[in-house]
Image (cartoon, helix red, strand yellow):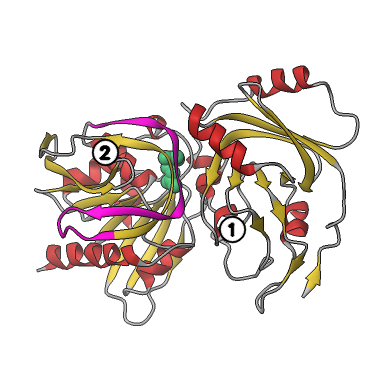
Amino acid sequence: MTTSTRGTAKVPAVLVLEDGRIFRGRAYGAVGETFGEAVFNTGMTGYQETLTDPSYHRQVVVMTAPHVGNTGVNDEDDESRKIWVAGYVVRDPARVRSNWRSRRTLDDELVAQGVVGISDIDTRALTRHLRERGAMRVGIFSGEGLADDGTLLTRVRQAPEMSGADLSAQVATTNAYVVPAIGTKRFTVVALDLGIKGMTPHRMAERGIEVHVLPATATVDEVYAVRPDGVFLSNGPGDPATADLTVVKAVLERGTPLFGICFGNQLLGRSLGFGTYKLKYGHRGINQPVQDRSTGKVEVTAHNHGFAVDAPLDQVSETPYGRAEVSHVCLNDNVVEGLRLLDRPAFSVQYHPEAAAGPHDAAYLFDRFVSLMEGQRA
Ligand SMILES: NC(=O)CC[C@H](N)C(=O)O
């Protein structure tokens, strides 16, 4: 049990939303200023996985769980090489960390990585505001002698928006690397890194898959030089409308088994000719109910998405790659949560079966990917 070295700091901070609503609190993490899209996450646990998920690049994450930091930061649960959130908003940071795996306090980790946050504000009021008005730009400013509110608001309104943002290449690996199969190797998969979380290749490796993670900018030739049994499209930040679809379309054309998660689902959708649109405030948390329409089963799932695919729920669609249907749907709001091709071995989901953090209900999707690859061999 260790007390944060900065737990008693009382540096003033202010959170300014682009519509002019202002919350005043205390600095949490690094002191300074930051801008991004304000989004809220409803997970009661898993803050380390949230912070290090590259899909949160350029987003300021508001935690609806009031008390964050209790279990500190450990050396095992990071989903990537660093914290990606642009800013962090917490009601009541833990003053004490307590967990057998804990190595550092969350506050110290945010400081070490230069992540500006704010605490001691009414996160329920902020979340209700975002639910009513929608996700919007925000700035957090901390320290003594801040500029007046009007000046800060002008600066928030000058920050870039999330719509139209092309961000995968900013977070993805620049060098290809291999995650070896655990146990006997059965398949080779190319995973396109659009902002991949570390648990995803691990879930494949557990199933005997050797995963070749390639940069977001990999070409069709680079993908097929690996001679993959399957291709995986990862999660990632930004607006899917900006993404290059050349590789996805080539994979569909050749009929190589394809599986996509989150941003990958959006890219499959766009490649099939469906649109994508921005949700009012998105799905972010670890208890979202999703129905698998092929079995009727409901699974509790981890989500982090602000965009969604616009596909008809109750009819099979004709696409350039044959028939496609909506395979999964969110029971809270009927948002499309998965797509499946009926004539080619390709499917995707909008949520996170790798479950880091999150319930493991959707792990069967990795087995479905394996089945598709087995089917191609038979
Ligand atoms: N986790 C993800 O892959 C997010 C995809 C996309 N950036 C969205 O917000 O919808």
As rendered, which of 83 and 88 lies closer to the eye?
88
Q: Residue 318: where, in percent of width, then height? A: 10, 35
Q: Is residue 98 left or right of residue 61?
A: right
Q: Residue at x 34, y 37 (%)?
A: 308
Is residue 165 visible to us here?
no
Q: Secondary structure at mark 1?
A: helix
Q: Secondary structure at mark 2?
A: helix
Farthest bottom residue in view: 183
Q: Quadrant of ligand 1?
A: top left
Is residue 370 visible to us here?
yes
Q: Residue at x 42, y 49 (%)?
A: 235
| Quarter holding residue 73 | bottom right
Task: Give amino acid for label 2.
Answer: Gly
Q: Residues within 10 Å of mark 1 (few under 14, many from 20)?
A: many
Residue that badge 2 annotates? 269
The stretch of residues the image draws in magenta is 274-298
Q: Residues within 10 Å of mark 2 (few under 14, many from 20)?
A: many
As rendered, which of 149 and 112 lies closer to the eye?
149
Membership of 117 in magenta stretch: no
Task: Give amino acid for label 1.
Answer: Tyr
Q: Residue at x 68, y 31 (%)?
A: 139
Residue that badge 1 annotates? 47
Q: Is residue 248 left or right of residue 97?
A: left
Q: Residue 23: where, in percent of width, then height? A: 71, 33
Q: Are marks 1 and 2 in contact (CB under 8 Å)?
A: no
Q: CA distance from mark 1 to mark 2?
A: 29 Å
Quadrant of the drawing holding the N terminus: bottom right
Q: Is residue 347 above or below residue 73?
A: above
